[in-house]
């Protein structure tokens, strides 16, 4: 059972407890989460820090300062927030924390951490229960440089950067505040002739943005891993952590494990595959028997899905997302790209989420024998493959949609909700555009 703390929720008035749907198989013995509606907003009545091993909060705190730190320092301070003896890289703090043989925290001074600065490209992972926290501000990690010096070669600008996977403009944002992606040109001549393109000729990266790019206006994704944890199998807590890029996803947990993973005020964006046949999600968690919970987090711009959760032979994962979002996922030749998806037998609760504008797939897609309760969520589909689907329930999956809205338009077939063999229960579901489709023995009924 979770240690439930309501301290951060105490100031709210007019809190209305919300009953779990009948038939929803969330294990409330292991994860006793109370759901409430506060001023029309659905919330979980939990304190996120209480959802992981309490030894994390009493263990050692290792400090990281990417500018003034030194990996030769101890990383320890007189109190949390004392960076006088800070390390310079996050992976050096992991090495020091692992040496204690006990749970610990990594407190990271706000700022930019690039390329191998997180896990030394997957080589240095924590092996104890751990928290990684942007201390009093955002920790920004990018699997690429934050600053690039460009040379004018006439019609385009070049930089000596190898292993380039995707290129974005930081000075030109989408309506959702995401970086605007440059298109890959066929060759150097085509790049020079076409604004907002890039190409790599084997030695140089060429970009054309219609003018001189600033040193920090172009984001270059290179072949580095993002926040990738392939061996760590203990409780993990993230707060104020913002990851950009990653050839295996911006956030990726893969180890067979019995543990909880919790994220608060984080973002995981713009995954870039090392191979076009192995497109990766922005945030992926696999093979975890425990609670996976994210609060006010975003997973956008993934090469395939935004949020993706798979049992893959390890049963017991329960997923809770509150106030989370997934925008504009899908890249290149990827198909079945989703803002949020669960597979196998994962039960999930989605509270107040936004999942929108994936390139090719469904915004919220629950598959196989999963069970998902979504309350106060929105999905907007504007697909490019001939059909737009906002919410989709496939195979033997069960879905409850409560105070949710689906908006699907722009293609030959548009469905706000599709039950493709799956069973969907609705309560105050609004089809803002697009119809409700039932195929392959699926059903849609009120609850």
Image (tube, rainbow, N blue to C red):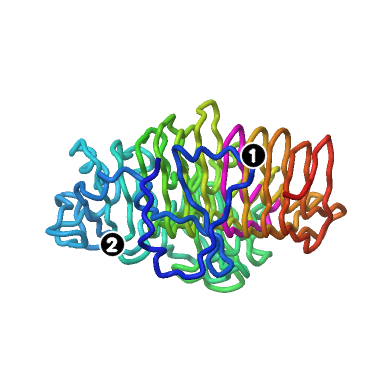
Q: Is residue 277 above or below residue 221?
A: above
Q: Position of residue 119 (x, y in %)?
A: 35, 44
- Looking at the rendered structure, the number of numbered marks drawn on it comes to 2
Left or right of 29 in this view: 187: right
Hey, which residue is sitting farthest bottom in the picture? 211
Query: Residue at image x 44%, y 57%?
Result: 266
Left or right of 277 in this view: 319: left
The 10 Å Cα crowd at callout 1, few under 14, some 14 to 19, many 20 or more, is few
Q: Secondary structure at mark 2?
A: loop
Residue nearest the viewer, comparing 2 with 205: 2
Hey, which residue is sitting farthest right in the picture? 412
| Residue 430 in view (yes/no) | yes
Query: Residue at image x 42%, y 56%?
Result: 264
Q: Position of residue 373 (x, y in %)?
A: 62, 48
Q: Earlier in the sequence, mark 2 or mark 1?
A: 1
Name the residue that disc number 2 marks. Answer: 109
Chain part drawn in magenta: 338-359
Left or right of 166 in this view: 360: right
As for residue 418 lying within the magenta part, the answer is no
Q: Position of residue 36 (x, y in %)?
A: 52, 58
Hey, which residue is sitting farthest top in the picture? 313
Residue nearest the viewer, comparing 11 with 175: 11
Q: Is residue 353 above or below residue 53?
A: below
What is the number of the mark on residue 23?
A: 1
């Amino acid at each position: 059972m979770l240690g439930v703390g309501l301290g951060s929720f105490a100031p709210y008035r007019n809190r209305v407890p919300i009953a779990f749907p009948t038939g929803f198989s969330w294990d409330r013995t292991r994860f006793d989460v109370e759901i409430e509606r506060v001023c029309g907003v659905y919330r979980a009545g939990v304190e996120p820090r209480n959802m992981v091993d309490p030894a994390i909060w009493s263990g050692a705190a290792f400090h990281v300062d990417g500018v003034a730190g030194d990996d030769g320092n101890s990383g320890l301070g007189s109190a949390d927030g004392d960076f006088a003896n800070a390390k310079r890289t996050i992976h050096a703090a992991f090495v020091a924390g692992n040496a204690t043989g006990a749970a610990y925290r990594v407190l990271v001074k706000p700022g930019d951490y690039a390329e191998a600065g997180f896990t030394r490209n997957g080589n240095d992972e924590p092996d104890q229960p751990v928290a990684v926290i942007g201390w009093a501000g955002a920790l920004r990690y990018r699997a690429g440089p934050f600053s690039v010096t460009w040379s004018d070669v006439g019609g385009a600008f070049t930089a000596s950067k190898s292993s380039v996977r995707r290129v974005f403009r930081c000075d030109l944002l989408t309506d959702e505040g995401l970086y605007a992606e440059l298109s890959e040109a066929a060759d150097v001549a085509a790049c020079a002739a076409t604004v907002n393109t890039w190409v790599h000729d084997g030695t140089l990266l060429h970009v054309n943005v219609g003018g001189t790019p600033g040193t920090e206006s172009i984001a270059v994704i290179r072949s580095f891993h993002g926040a990738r944890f392939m061996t760590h199998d203990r409780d993990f807590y993230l707060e104020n952590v913002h990851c950009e890029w990653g050839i295996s996803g911006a956030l990726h947990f893969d180890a067979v494990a019995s543990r909880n993973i919790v994220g608060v005020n984080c973002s995981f964006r713009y995954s870039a595959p090392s191979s076009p046949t192995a497109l990766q999600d922005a945030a992926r968690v696999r093979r975890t028997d425990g609670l996976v919970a994210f609060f006010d987090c975003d997973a956008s711009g993934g090469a395939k899905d935004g949020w993706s959760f798979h049992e893959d032979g390890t049963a017991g994962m329960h997923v809770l997302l509150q106030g989370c979002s997934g925008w504009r996922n899908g890249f290149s030749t990827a198909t079945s790209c989703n803002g949020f998806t669960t597979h196998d037998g994962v039960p999930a609760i989605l509270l107040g989420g936004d999942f929108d504008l994936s390139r090719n797939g469904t915004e919220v897609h629950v598959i196989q024998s999963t069970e998902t309760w979504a309350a106060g969520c929105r999905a907007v589909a504007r697909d490019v493959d001939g059909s737009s689907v906002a919410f989709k329930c496939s195979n033997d999956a069960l879905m409850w949609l409560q105070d949710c809205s689906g908006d699907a338009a722009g293609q030959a077939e548009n469905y706000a909700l599709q039950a493709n063999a799956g069973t969907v229960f609705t309560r105050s579901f609004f089809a803002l555009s697009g119809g409700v489709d039932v195929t392959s023995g699926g059903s849609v009924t009120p609850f």
